[in-house]
Amino acid sequence: MSHKVYNWQLNRKMEYKYPESRPKKQAAWIFDTNKCIACQTCTFACKNAWTAGKGQEYMWWNNVETKPWGFYPLGWDVRLLEKLGPQDWSGWKYKGKTIFESAGFGEEVLGWHPEENDYLYPNLGEDEVSSAIKDKDYIKIPHQPWMFYLQRICNHCTYPACVAACSRKAIYKREEDGIVLIDQKRCRGYQECIKACPYKKTFFRELTGKSEKCIACYPGVEGNSPAKERIQTQCVINCIGKIRLFGFKSRYDEAREDNPFDYLIHIKKVALPLYPQFGLEPNVYYIPPINVPDKFNLQLFGPGALKAVEYYRRASLDKKLIGILMLMGSTDKITRSFKVEGDIEKGSVTGYDEQGKEIVKVPLKEPIYIRKEFDEERNVRRFSVT
Ligand code: SF4
Ligand code: SF4
């Protein structure tokens, strides 16, 4: 039996196995694709924390792939897009079918199961551009050919395909924060979740005969870090490019202007879900890349992609947007609300925790220090003087 549930990303109701039930607050991430340098520090921070054990070698709960040619596992998205068929939108409303609505007889989800070989090349296509570079193409703006880095973790979806597919009910979504976990005691290794998750973010561990996935670093999120503070996930804290933010978003119809997630996702609509047409209401939100073809952005991030790019290009007109971008990477603690004061040149942004206590304050504009070309103290010349 299936239920009619509301999916705000599709702007309509859809079929799902379980009734609509939203957590009190939803764990969410924002990734600014434009600032990522593909250093993979996030990838290894995650691996060191959670998947350095025997039998977990091939597991990358976090990976960063270069689009359009990077995939982990091989062809994870294009294979499903092809199976799903036409994915039309009429304005903000999705007219096509979701992967729940396209499931075959006796199945909960339209999916496919990767084979061992599909996991062999996690860095396939890394730093490769979309096509061969012709004479002088590289100086044209927007860049032709193009590429960008896509950061990928489990989306802790509102309507998880892994939950719908698991006949053992071993996967659950926590009421308190929407984090999706696999109960290792209940799991029997049927691998239905691996077939069902369109993002391919559950992994089977031969050694234990059970499936595993991103746990959203819940011990730290709950405040069980060594510092006894509620901290963001490891992929966020360790991000070199300061492109990531972890926290909680409100319900789609209760957005608060002072919540950085609500502001970017619901109010300004500049942070968008990945493949909303699959129907899972994923909770990792991306600021789309500004130098890729519109069609590609629209397919990945839905109908809001072009407006989001336009808005981001004019970021300097919105102090609050700048403020949130500056909060990224400025604290390991979880920011529940924020306030911007002053102008872009001299102003600042302050982040507050759940109790309204100040946890971080940073300038809206980072100061630039220009060092002298010749360093008299060390008697050396500098090639880079910024
Ligand atoms: S650590 Fe940050 S900048 Fe580096 S690859 Fe990961 S997301 Fe990108
Ligand atoms: S991304 Fe995949 S594994 Fe994560 S909650 Fe969604 S369906 Fe489940």
Image: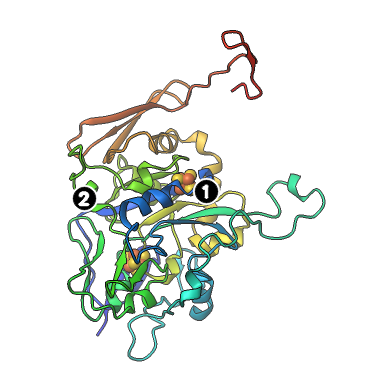
Is residue 180 at least partly visible in the picture? yes
- Indicate the amino acid at tag 2: Pro
Describe the colour scheme in one phrase.
Answer: rainbow
Residue placed under numbered mark 1 in the picture: 38
Left-right relation of 372 to 103:
right
Is residue 263 at least partly visible in the picture? no
Q: In which image quadrant can residue 293 be found? A: bottom right
- For the point 60% across and 58% down, which residue is it? 294
Q: Position of residue 343 (x, y in %)?
A: 44, 24
Q: Position of residue 159 (x, y in %)?
A: 30, 69
Q: Quadrant of the N terminus?
A: bottom left
Q: In which image quadrant can residue 132 be found? A: bottom right
Q: Is mark 2 within 8 Å of ligand 2?
A: no
349 or 268, nearer to the observer: 349
Residue placed under numbered mark 2 in the picture: 219
Q: Is mark 1 within 8 Å of ligand 1?
A: yes
- Indicate the amino acid at tag 1: Ala
